[in-house]
Image (cartoon, rainbow, N blue to C red):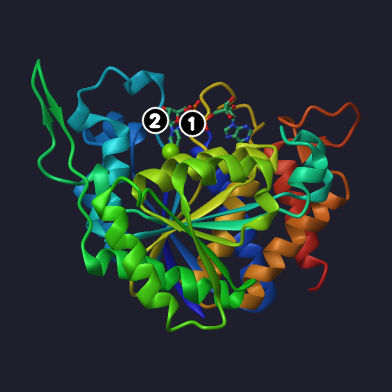
Amino acid sequence: MKKRVAVLSGDGIGKEVTEAAVAVLDSIGRRFHHKFEWVYGLLGGAALDEAGHPIPEETIKICEESDAILLGAIGGPKWDHFPKELRPEKGLLQIRKHFELSVNLRPVQAYKTLLAFSPLKEEVAEGVDLVFVRELTGGLYFGEPSYHTDDQAVDTLVYGREEIERVVRFAFELAKQRRNKVSSIDKANVLESSRLWRKIVEEVAAEYPEVEYEHMLVDSASMKLITSPASFDVIVTENMFGDILSDEASVIAGSLGMLPSASLRADGFGLYEPVHGSAPDIAGQNKANPVGAILSGAMMLRSTFGMNQEAAAIEEAVRNVLEDGYFTGEFKVDGSNVLTTTEMTEKIIEEIEKEL
Ligand code: NAI
Ligand code: MG
C-alpha cells in the first residue's frame, strides 16, 4: 500500500521523536512492502517563528492532502508570553476542531521490565493494560458562552446526543476487540450532561450484550485508577474528565515518554502523537524516549490504515527491546543499557527487520 503522512514535528523533542517514528515506519514499509510518503509541515512554536502563526494555512493544506497526521510535540518557554490566540497550543486545538477529531485514544500499559519505575507498587501496576476513550471536541473546553469579566467567569458544559453516542459506541466496539469490558466515567450525581451520558451508555450497551459495562463516578474512579488499575479495560469518558484521568493513569507506565495517543475522526482519519510535551529540559540532546512516538505510529497503522499485522510488529519489537533490558535515560538504571534516542530507535528497527 502507498500512504501519504503529514509530519508535524513541532518543538523541542518533537523533532527527535517524530524522526524516530518515521524511521521505524519506513522499516515496516521495507518488511511489509508499503511505501510511506512523508510531507513535513510547521506547527506550534516552530510555525510561530517561521510563519508568524501557530498553524499556518499551508500546514492545514498538507494535512488535508494526507491520509493521516503524525505529530511530535509543541510549546516551550520561548512562546509562553505570547497572547492566547498565538499560543502554540492554539495550533493543536485548532487541528482537533478543524479535522473533527472527536475520539481520543490513550492506551496505558505497564511493561514488566519497567514496573520498578512506576510510582505504584509493582504488584498493583503489574498487568495494567487499559485504554482511555476520551471525547475530544465537546464539553467544557468548547462550550459557549465562555468568557470572564473582573467579577465573573463563565464556562459552559454542553453535550449533544450524537457526540456522546459516537464516542460511547467507539468504546464498545473497541472493547469487543479487547477484554469486553467498558467503564463509563461521569458525574451523574451532580451534572445533567452526565445524566444524559449515562442514559446513552445504557442504550448503546443494550446492543452489545457480550460486553460487560459499569458506570463510575469520576471521583471514585480516580481512586480506583491508583488502587486497582489492572481492573480496567476500556474507559470511556467526556473531555475534561478524560484529560485529567488519562494524565493520572499515565504515570503507571513509569515514564511519560512511553505513551502513545490517537485522535480520530469518524471516517478513520487520525492524528497520532506521543502523550508527552516538548520537554525543553532535554531537547536537542538525543536523550528523549522515542517509544511513545513509535507506538503512536503503530496506532496509525492499525486505526487509520487497517494494517493490524504491521502495528503488532512494532508493538512486539518495542516489547522485546524493553524485555532485553534496553531503556532511554529517564529510567535511572546503573549499567550500560541506557540508550540514546537514536540507539533505542535502531534497536527497535533491528528487531523489526530480524524477520526480513
Ligand atoms: P513534558 O511532557 O514536555 O515534560 C515533562 C517531563 O517529562 C520533563 O522532565 C521531560 O524531560 C520528561 N519527558 C517528556 N517526554 C519525554 C520523553 N519522550 N523522554 C524522556 N523524558 C521525557 O511536559 P512539560 O514540561 O509540562 O511541558 C513542556 C512544554 O510542552 C510546554 O510548553 C507544554 O505546554 C508543552 N506540552 C505539549 C504537549 C503536546 O504537544 N501535546 C503536551 C504537554 C505539554
Ligand atoms: Mg492534558
Q: Is residue 103 left or right of residue 248?
A: left
119 to 124, vertically: above or below: above
176 to 130, vertically: above or below: below
| Image quadrant in which you'd find residue 162 | bottom left
**Residue lying at the far right of the rendered structure:** 335
Q: Which residue is mark 1?
A: 12
**Residue lying at the far front of the rendered structure:** 189
Q: Count how many numbered circles sit on residues in the image.
A: 2
Residue positioned 74% across, 30% down in the render: 329
Task: Give the structural element (helix, strand or loop) at label 1.
Answer: loop
Q: Is residue 171 left or right of residue 321?
A: left
At label 2, the amino acid type is: Gly
Cβ of disc 1 within 8 Å of ligand 1? yes
Mark 2 and 1 residues: CB-CB less than 8 Å, in contact? yes
Bin the neighbour count of mark 1 within 10 Å (Cα to Cα): few under 14, some 14-19, many 20 and up: many
Q: Which residue is mark 2?
A: 75
Residue positioned 76% across, 55% down in the render: 127
Q: Is residue 131 left or right of residue 146?
A: right
The picture quadrant for ligand 2 comes to top left
- In the depicted view, which residue is nearer to us: 271 or 353? 271
183 to 108, vertically: above or below: below
Residue 251 percent coordinates (x, y): 63, 37
